[in-house]
C-alpha cells in the first residue's frame, strides 16, 4: 500500500471488519481461515480519492459547449439541464457516479440543481443512483432566488429589445417556497449519515438576495447541514459583488453568518488577501477546481496562499458541463500544474504529495467526513482503490505518489472498495450494464434536446451580448485598478 516513507509503497495486509479498517499488519500475520480474502498482490492500495465539488446534473452534459466562459455556461444552463424528469436526474447522477468509482473516487460533494426549486423526488432520484453504485456523497441542493439574468443589474437592459421580456420572465421558485423545500428535505432525510449526507448550497452569492442567504443559513444551522457556495469563480462575479453588495462576495457571505467551519468556498479564484483571512479566521475550507477554471478561462486559484493561512483545501473536478470528466487523478495533476504557473518559486508549488493530500484528507474535511475517510488508517472506513502495478503507468515504479499525480489517468484502477464493499472490479463498476446505460443516456439527450430546442436558440442568440456585458464588468474592475482582486 501507499506509504509516506517508502517511495514504492509497503507490503501490508489490511483487515476489514464490516465497513471499517480494523487493522493494518505485516503480510500473512493474521489468520484468514474465517475471512474473505481479496488478493492485492502487485496492487498499489491508495485511499479513495474524494471529489470536493461536482454537479450530478452535469452527468448528461459532458462535451456540451466548447468556447464557453462561465457566463456563457450559466446562460446555457436552462437548455442544458431543463425539462428533466426524476428519471433523467437519476440517470445523470448514475453516469456521474459510475465515472467517479471507475476513476478511483469513492466520495463526492454534489451541488445538485433543480429548476425552479429542489424537490424530495429529485433528491431521492440522485440518492438512489449513489446507492446503486455505492458512492459516498454529500448532496447539497443548489438554490437561488435570482436567475443569472436577474443577478446582474443592467444585463437584461443590455439585451436586444425583443429578448428582454423573455429574459425577465424566467424566474426561480419563490424564496419562501425554496426555503420550505429545504426544510422539508432536511426533516425527511433518512439516509445513513456516514453514506449520504444532505448539505445546502446557495449557488452564487449574487444569485441570492441577502435575506435568502440568511434563510439558507438558518435551515443549515437548524439541521446541522454543511454548506458550499461558488465564491469568486470568475472575475465578473467578483466585480458584480462590489456593485451589488458594496463589498466582496466573501465578506457579504460572512456578514450573513454563512462563513464558518461548516462552509466551503468552491473555486475561490478572485479573492483578495482579506477574503482569505476571513475564510481562515472562520475555519472555512476551499474546494479547488483547477480543471474547470482552465476550461472556462476563469483564472487560477491561489491554493498555496490558502494553505499558508491554515485554510483546508480540497480538490474537485466541478460538473461535467465545465470539466467534461470526473477524473480526480487529472484534477490532482491540474492542481499540481497550475500551482507552478503563478510565478512562485518551486518551493511554493504544490508537490505531488500536497496534491494527493488535498484530494484525500483535504476533500474529506470539505465533505465533513474527515473522521471517516481520506486515510488508510485503523478505524477509518475501508474506502480503498487498488491500482495495477503492472500497468504501464507504473513501469517502472520510481515514486508511487509522484506517479499517482503526474502519470495516472485512471486506467490502472483495478478494484475499488467503498465501506469494504467491492464496487469496481477489473476497472468496471459492478452491476452496471454500460451498453444499456449508453442507450438510455442517448435517448434522454435526444428527447431533452428536442424539448429544450427553443431555450437553446434563445441562449445562443444572446450569447454575444451576455459575453460582452460580463467582460465589461470584469474590465471595469481592471480599469479601476482594483488590485485587491489579485490574489497575491
Ligand atoms: Zn460548480
Image (spheres, rainbow, N blue to C red):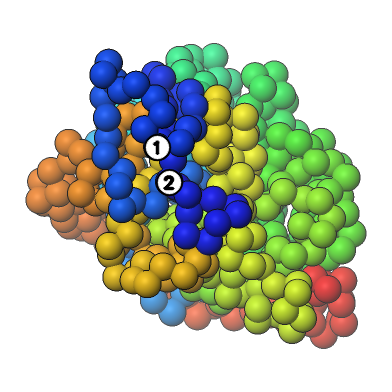
Residue 163: tell me if it is visible.
Answer: no
* Residue 72: % across, % down: 49, 70
| Mark before the other along the chain sequence, 2 or 1 | 2
**Cβ–Cβ under 8 Å for marks 2 and 1:** yes
Please determine whether, in this image, residue 476 is positioned above or below residue 145: below
309 lies left or right of 213: right
* Residue 36: % across, % down: 26, 24
375 lies left or right of 473: left
How dense is the environment of label 2, judged by Cα within 10 Å: few (below 14), some, or many (20 and up)?
Answer: some
Image point 83% across, 73% down: which residue? 488
Name the residue beneath numbered marker 2.
11
Image point 74% across, 84% down: which residue? 343
182 lies left or right of 431: right
Q: 366 or 215: which is nearer to us?
A: 366
Could you say which quadrant of the image residue 267 lies in? Answer: bottom right
* Residue 134: % across, % down: 33, 33
| Real-space CA distance between mark 2 and mark 1, rounded to the nearest whole angstrom | 7 Å
Q: What element carries label 2?
A: loop
Q: Residue furthest front?
A: 29
* Residue 43: % across, % down: 33, 51
191 lies left or right of 479: left
Name the residue beneath numbered marker 1.
27
Image point 56% across, 47% down: which residue? 360
Q: 462 or 93: which is nearer to us?
A: 93
Could you say which quadrant of the image residue 268 lies in? Answer: bottom right
Please determine whether, in this image, residue 388 is positioned above or below residue 380: below
Q: Residue 446 carries which label?
A: none
Could you say which quadrant of the image residue 180 lies in? Answer: top right
Amino acid at each position: 500500500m501507499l506509504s509516506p516513507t517508502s517511495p514504492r509503497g509497503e507490503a501490508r495486509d489490511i483487515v476489514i471488519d464490516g465497513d471499517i479498517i480494523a487493522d493494518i499488519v505485516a503480510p500473512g500475520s493474521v489468520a484468514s481461515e474465517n475471512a474473505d480474502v481479496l488478493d492485492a498482490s502487485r496492487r498499489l492500495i491508495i485511499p479513495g480519492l474524494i471529489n470536493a465539488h461536482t454537479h450530478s446534473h452535469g452527468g448528461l452534459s459532458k462535451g456540451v459547449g466548447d468556447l464557453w466562459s462561465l457566463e456563457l455556461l450559466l446562460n446555457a444552463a436552462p437548455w442544458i439541464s431543463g425539462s428533466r424528469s426524476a428519471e433523467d436526474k437519476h440517470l445523470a447522477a448514475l453516469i456521474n457516479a459510475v465515472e467517479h468509482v471507475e476513476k478511483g473516487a469513492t466520495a463526492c460533494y454534489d451541488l445538485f440543481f433543480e429548476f425552479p426549486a429542489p424537490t424530495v423526488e429529485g433528491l431521492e432520484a440522485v440518492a438512489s443512483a449513489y446507492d446503486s453504485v455505492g458512492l459516498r456523497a454529500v448532496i447539497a441542493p443548489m438554490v437561488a432566488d435570482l436567475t443569472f439574468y436577474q443577478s446582474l443589474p443592467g444585463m437584461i437592459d443590455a439585451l436586444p429589445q425583443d429578448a428582454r421580456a423573455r429574459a425577465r420572465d424566467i424566474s426561480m421558485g419563490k424564496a419562501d417556497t425554496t426555503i420550505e423545500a429545504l426544510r422539508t428535505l432536511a426533516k425527511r432525510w433518512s439516509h445513513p449519515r456516514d453514506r449520504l449526507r444532505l448539505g445546502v448550497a446557495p449557488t452564487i452569492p449574487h444569485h441570492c438576495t441577502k435575506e435568502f442567504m440568511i434563510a439558507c443559513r438558518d435551515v443549515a444551522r437548524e439541521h446541522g447541514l454543511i454548506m458550499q457556495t461558488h465564491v469568486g469563480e470568475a472575475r465578473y462575479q467578483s466585480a458584480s459583488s462590489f456593485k451589488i453588495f458594496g463589498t466582496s462576495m466573501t465578506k457579504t457571505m460572512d456578514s450573513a453568518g454563512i462563513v464558518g467551519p461548516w462552509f466551503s468556498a468552491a473555486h475561490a479564484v478572485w479573492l483578495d488577501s482579506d477574503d482569505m483571512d476571513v475564510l481562515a479566521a472562520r475555519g472555512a475550507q476551499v474546494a479547488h477546481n483547477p480543471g474547470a477554471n482552465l476550461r472556462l478561462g476563469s483564472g487560477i486559484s491561489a491554493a498555496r496562499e490558502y494553505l499558508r493561512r491554515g485554510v483546508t483545501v480540497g480538490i474537485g473536478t466541478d460538473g461535467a458541463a465545465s470539466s467534461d470528466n470526473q477524473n480526480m487523478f487529472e484534477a490532482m495533476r491540474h492542481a499540481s500544474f497550475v500551482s507552478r504557473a503563478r510565478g512562485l518559486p518551486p518551493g511554493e508549488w504544490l508537490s505531488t504529495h500536497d496534491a494527493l493530500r488535498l484530494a484525500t484528507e483535504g476533500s474529506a474535511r470539505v465533505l465533513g467526513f474527515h473522521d471517516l475517510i481520506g486515510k488508510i488508517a485503523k478505524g477509518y472506513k475501508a474506502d480503498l482503490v487498488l491500482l495495477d502495478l503492472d500497468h504501464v503507468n507504473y513501469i517502472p515504479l520510481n515514486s508511487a505518489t509522484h506517479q499517482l499525480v503526474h502519470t495516472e489517468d485512471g486506467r490502472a484502477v483495478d478494484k475499488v472498495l467503498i465501506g469494504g464493499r467491492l464496487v469496481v472490479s477489473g476497472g468496471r463498476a459492478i452491476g452496471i450494464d454500460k451498453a444499456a446505460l449508453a442507450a438510455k443516456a442517448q435517448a434522454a439527450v435526444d428527447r431533452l434536446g428536442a424539448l429544450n430546442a427553443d431555450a437553446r436558440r434563445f441562449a445562443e442568440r444572446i450569447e454575444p451580448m451576455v459575453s460582452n456585458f460580463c467582460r465589461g464588468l470584469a474590465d471595469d474592475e481592471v480599469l479601476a485598478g482594483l488590485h485587491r482582486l489579485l490574489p497575491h
